Amino acid sequence: MPQTLAPYAVTEHNSRGRQFPEKPHRYRADFERDRDRIIHCAAFRRLEGKTQVFTTGLNDQYRTRMTHSIEVAQIGRTIARVLNLNESLTEAICLAHDLGHSPFGHAGEAVLNELTADVGGFEHNRQSLRIVDFLEHPYPAFAGLNLMYETRMALAKHQSPYDNPEGSAEAICLEGRIADVADRIAYNCHDLEDGLRSRLLNEEQLKGITLYEEACRTVGAERIDDIVIRRTRISKAILDYLAIDAIETSRQLLEKHQIQSLEDVYDCPVRLIDLSAEVEAKLRELERFLYTNLYYHPKIAGQAAAIRGWLTRLFEKYSARPELMPHYYQHMIAAEGLKRIVCDYVSGMTDRYAMTMQE
Ligand code: MG
């Protein structure tokens, strides 16, 4: 039995559709096609080689942007399914939400933003939209993946504490909001786990962090001798706790604000997919801990100077000799400007490729 969607879910019927009309597919719905186009695009494949927190290649167990995106999609799909929202749309947004990230994570993004300051800067959400709308080119008749309007809007407006999306004139669907919450749940839990794996964090430091201590009690951490199993159980317990809270809080919010249709969603000034105030406070405590002790750990933050050097050198190299870029990029220079195209090319690189191309 196909699932009955809530009246406020985005569907093929209430969607604003695609920029370039296409014939319906015999077997796949429009938002399933969006998801599939994202999985099959080159920028998605390159997420495998892009830093989440730890530079790729140091340890094969750490999250990459790709495994992060898959974890976000898993959490997002669960939340969407339980709330009777559009699961395929949620999955598409989650899988695409980090497509625009440069190599070397947020440190890389900051450098590219400075290098392009005079032509509008670089910001990964905006770049995600640019990738799906313009840089991917699998079709002869138009640039981009020709995704559904709601998928595109959610990418343009994807928000997390790091993010800095452009103005908020356009409304965002609930499925897009799920991606925001799922992203936050995913990165806090897996960064905690990878932080412990890397030994930049230790269990002693985490004493006093409420979410961590509660999860230790939930899983009976003191009876689990193996640290690998222990930290996995703890991080999964936190994930489950946050996802359940997001589901139950959002359900209450939708009821409280009497949301009956997609128009109600767009008109409602309140965030309808959210954590409870109590859990939000606990998550902020963990986030503050991770900022101070992991993201700003000297071993992580200390790479910023080297990353600045690598990306600046690449930027100068391709600006001086654009003929070294693939033809596809060279052809766009006349219309888009040299700096923008060099930024597109360099920001699309994996960590590995950016290192190799230093020569
Ligand atoms: Mg993310």
Image (cartoon, rainbow, N blue to C red):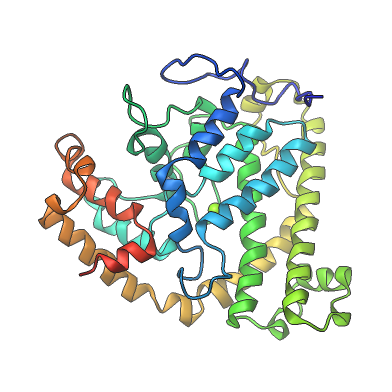
130 or 57, nearer to the observer? 57
Q: Position of residue 288 (x, y in %)?
A: 62, 69
180 or 20, nearer to the observer? 20
Q: Position of residue 237 (x, y in %)?
A: 79, 63
Q: Position of residue 28 (x, y in %)?
A: 60, 24
Question: In the figure, residue 172 lies in which quadrant?
Answer: top right
Q: Is residue 52 left or right of residue 281?
A: left
Q: Residue at x 61, y 72 (%)?
A: 194
Q: Is residue 117 left or right of residue 154?
A: left
Quadrant of image for the C terminus: bottom left
323 or 278, nearer to the observer? 323
Question: In the figure, residue 327 lies in which quadrant?
Answer: top left
Q: Position of residue 138 (x, y in %)?
A: 37, 32
For the image shown, how many numbered marks are present on the structure? 0
Q: Is residue 284 left or right of residue 295?
A: right
Quadrant of image for the N terminus: top right
Q: Is residue 12 left or right of residue 251?
A: left
Q: In this rendering, does residue 164 appear at all? A: no
Q: Is residue 341 above or below residue 268?
A: below
Question: In the figure, residue 30 lies in which quadrant?
Answer: top right
Q: Is residue 282 above or below residue 209?
A: above
Q: In this rendering, does residue 294 appear at all? A: yes
Q: Residue at x 56, y 35 (%)?
A: 35
Q: Residue at x 56, y 39 (%)?
A: 93
